[in-house]
Image (cartoon, rainbow, N blue to C red):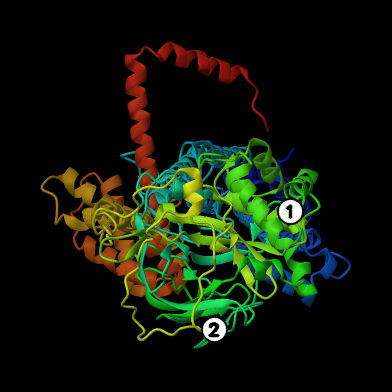
Amino acid sequence: MSGRTRLALCAFTATMMAAGALLPLVETSRWIAQAAFLLAVQSGVGVLARRLSSARVLTVCLQALVTLLTVTAAFAREHALFGVVPGPQAVQWFADLLTAGADDVGRYASPAPATDGIRLMLVGGVLLVGLAVDVLAVTFRSAAPAGLPLLALYSVAAGLADGGAGWLWFLLAAGGYLLLLLAEGRDRLSRWGRVFGGVSRSSGGLAAGLDGAPGRAPVRTGRRIGAVALGVALVVPAVLPAMDGGLLGDRGSTGRGGGGGTISAVNPLVSLQNNLNQPENRQVLTYRTTSSDPQDLYLRILALDQFNGSEWRSSTRRLRDVPDRLPQPDGLGPDVTVTEVRTNIAADDSYGQTYLPLPYPASEVGVDGRWRFEPEGRTLVGDGGQTTRGARYQVSSLAVEPTAEQLAAATAPRPDLTREYTQVPRSLPDVVRKTAKDVTAGAGNDYERAVALQDWFAYDGGFRYDTTVTSGTGSAAIERFLRDREGFCVHFSFTMAAMARTLGIPARVAVGFTPGTPQADGSVSVGLRDAHAWPELYFEGVGWTRFEPTPSRGSAPSYTLPETPSPGVDDPAQPSAGDTAVPSAAPSASESCPAQMRRQGECGETAAPGAVAPTDPGTPAGTVALWVLGALVVLALPLLPLFWRTRVRARRLGSSGGRTPAEAAARVLAAWREVTDTAWDHGVQPDESQTPRKAAARIVRLGRLDAAAAASVHRLAGAVEQVLYAPEPRPATGLSEDVAVVRAGLRASAGRSDRLRATVAPRSSVRVIWGLSERRAKLTGRWSARLGAGRWAAVTSRLRRRTPRRA
């Protein structure tokens, strides 16, 4: 196996080891097998192209072309020409997939489902990083910079994973990078017995030339750069703020689960469960309302209306500007009693997510900022980064109060609505349909079936409410929930919605907050532990109707309770309007315990003993200082060579002269070293094999120096010859001025990019790594001598002499 082939194999291995850090982000690991296959094809094309041609650009272009074709065949075969050539339809398909993937990444909590969009982003990202690593490490034979794309791959995983990417994945990524560095060092040594390493590092050597140790400088350089890159990989994820936020997002909270107190996904399982298990019910919303029964005022965020067997999620629908008056709720008839309720809501400054919590169905919303309206789910979505953080808004909503008779007499829904909202996946276990039929046996209509399902979950089925049960919304999780009969609101709502669909009842799941806790000052406080999910079933003439199957959570609607008369108003056809935009009536808690809680023995004191004002302690000063310090460290790392070079130049040229001949000679050699390093920074590599005079002529020729700069170089070379060869060297003057003239001449003849490279990333800064290497060698030598390692070194030396070298 040739050196480049071996290096390409190591680049492939390093990329896949770093890609392992992405595995905890999704529920399935099958995508990584696809990424490995496509990356192997990409690497194989690179190996073949480098054997056929030495043109580097051609190799990179071929790899990029084959990668595009293979990705097209994997993700857009139906939309491509001949199944592999991306045409306009395939490009549009990729754009749609990437848009959907970006939306999924922003909304799903890890581990997220491997949707087509997320899978394209994962596989495509691995292929792009793999191409960058292969190009840098194999095509251009520079393995050390290849750590940057590998670092990017790991940092993305560490930033998105709940609680970080973990030490195992870091060690795998680091091991792959070090393997790549070692392979490149071995390849260099096998190709060049003596590798250029810059100037001599001996204290008495001339400041230009070849390194006497074959191949040690590049290997050590790569190792040091690798150590720096691994250090950055540890520091960056630690100092960057966590990327939370989403559906019920609350960045300020802390709690178990890493992100604590957030629901950052349309599939809100993991974060909602974290909310319900918070040790403190930290406030996120407060409101005042004119509702006569605030315990029925659920704050709804959005509805999940698609069930594909592995998850419930919301459909992607078109948004439009928020109208002054929201349209009439779908399916609501004129015979149903409605009361218009006015509510003033204030979101905490630490509560930031893109969906606006609203009572359902809202009829009018007054809110500042950039918000868009989604008509089907009647939700308001932030546009252009708009969130609820610190929002103050007023909502008019309809308290829909149907009677049991109206729900029982509901006619069949529209065919298109039935078709969309009764779909269930083929993977749904038969036990779900069978159980739904058994529970609703004897019911005469859809309303009675819905109430039977609610009562079975809440009272009669023997279910236990437990927030520590493993989350899950797919078919397998529903089957497990029906078997074990323990879970929290997500399990109850999703299972009831799935069972209702099997009975032909249109159903979806709403996510939001229960009404909260009334306060002494008349307001209502909503905390993290009020996060909730509940099913909504559709009845023609009433519309989407809330049910409450979760025991000990929220309140069962009055129209589902037996022998409960429906409250009326003077004019049921017209909603009652409030007098002002700001409600003045304080919410009042029910004087009697709700029937659902009476049945469960949950009645008790619900009012808080005193007013609880919204509190926002803000980000701790120590955290802010840590972020700032981390950002400064990350920004300063690329400038370290510049800082070091400036300091070394000042030290070399700082002294005005020497009192002794030895000090004067050291100053001449320091000035000459500064000239050769400056030429090196501008692309003129030192050559130890030449005399100072020939080295000066070489700098003049390759650096394209003018007459003044050339004269300064030759004067400095003459001073060096005096120091090295003259019996009594003549004192040299004007060394600093000559160095400044040479530096100005090199900068004048160099291009803009070369000047920038010489300033920001000077090549001579490799001396720092050489210095550290020498110190380590000396320290190792001293310890070896103390520990009696001389005999062991002799043994290993004899073994090396007996072992034949590989060509």
Q: Quadrant of residue 122?
A: bottom right
Whether residue 672 is visible, yes or no, is: no
Q: Which residue is mark 2?
A: 326
Q: Position of residue 785 (x, y in %)?
A: 34, 16
Place of residue 669 in the rendered image (x, y in percent of width and height, measured from the top left): 28, 50
Answer above or below: position of 160 versus 300.
above
Q: Quadrant of the C terminus?
A: top right
Q: Is residue 718 above or below residue 15?
A: below
Amino acid type, residue under disc 2 in the picture: Leu
In the rendered image, which residue does mark 1 sit on?
A: 42
| Residue 395 marker | none
Report the mark closest to the observer, 1 or 2: 2
Q: Amino acid at mark 1?
A: Gln
Which element carries disc 1, helix, strand or loop?
helix
Q: Position of residue 729 (x, y in %)?
A: 21, 49
Foreground residue among 680 and 55: 55
Which residue appears at 45% of the width and 61% of the height? 698
